[in-house]
Image (spheres, rainbow, N blue to C red):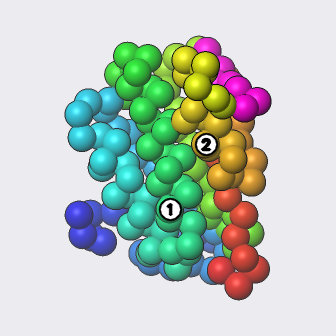
Amino acid sequence: MQPQDVPQTRSGGSWQRGAVQEHAAVAWRLPVKPGSVRVARRLVHLVCRMWGIPQAADPAVLAVSELMGNVAKAGGTDVRLCLSWTPRRLRVEVCDAAPATATAPPQVDGSNEGGRGLWLVRQSASRWGSQPTPRGKCVWAEFALDSGA
């Protein structure tokens, strides 16, 4: 995937590529099929680099991998992957058509059947949550950025 393959970002009333000063957002609709999680990870990594926040790439990639994996396990058909950035935070969202909200266990040990992925998201993110939408739900995670980002 090359930078020209990434959609343009919206910032301050004009369309532009690359790093922006105040805020940026981008979204994709991805099918849930073999290879989609890999594509999502690449998109997140590339966009973090383009926005000048490479330090946010690893935790954001982890979150997107886990959130998209949950949709795939639940038999979802497609997702909307959104990234938004301000100088203080990076937010990732994975939205799908399933109405059930996401919950993470308070702790994980060998007896847990599931929830390890959401537990990891909760541990690595500054904030995370799940909110219903008219078409299902959005699970999101926010990552704090240094003021110098």
Element type at mark 1? helix
- Name which residue lies at 44% across and 58% down: 44
Image location of residue 133, percent across then percent down: 63, 25
Residue at horizontal 58%, vertical 25%? Answer: 110
Q: Can residue 140 be seen in this view?
A: no
Residue position marked by numbered label 1 in the rendering: 58
Q: Does the magenta stretch include residue 98?
A: no
Q: What span is colored magenta in the figure?
A: 100-107
**In the displayed structure, does residue 52 sit left or right of residue 33?**
right
Residue that extends furthest to the bottom in the rendered view of this protein: 148
User: Image point 56% across, 57% down: which residue?
Assistant: 59
Mark whose residue sits in front, 1 or 2: 2
Q: Which amino acid does label 2 sit on?
A: Leu
Expressed as whole percent of the image width and height from the top left, the position of residue 93 reads 57, 43
Which element carries disc 2, helix, strand or loop?
helix
Tag of residue 120: 2
**Whether residue 112 can be seen here:** yes
Rendered residue at 66%/31% (across/down): 108
Decide: is 145 above or below 25: below
Q: Residues within 10 Å of mark 2 (few under 14, many from 20)?
A: some
- Name which quarter of the figure residue 55 lies in: bottom right
What's the amino acid at mark 1? Asp
Q: Nearer the viewer, residue 96 or 129?
A: 129
Left or right: residue 70 versus residue 133 is left
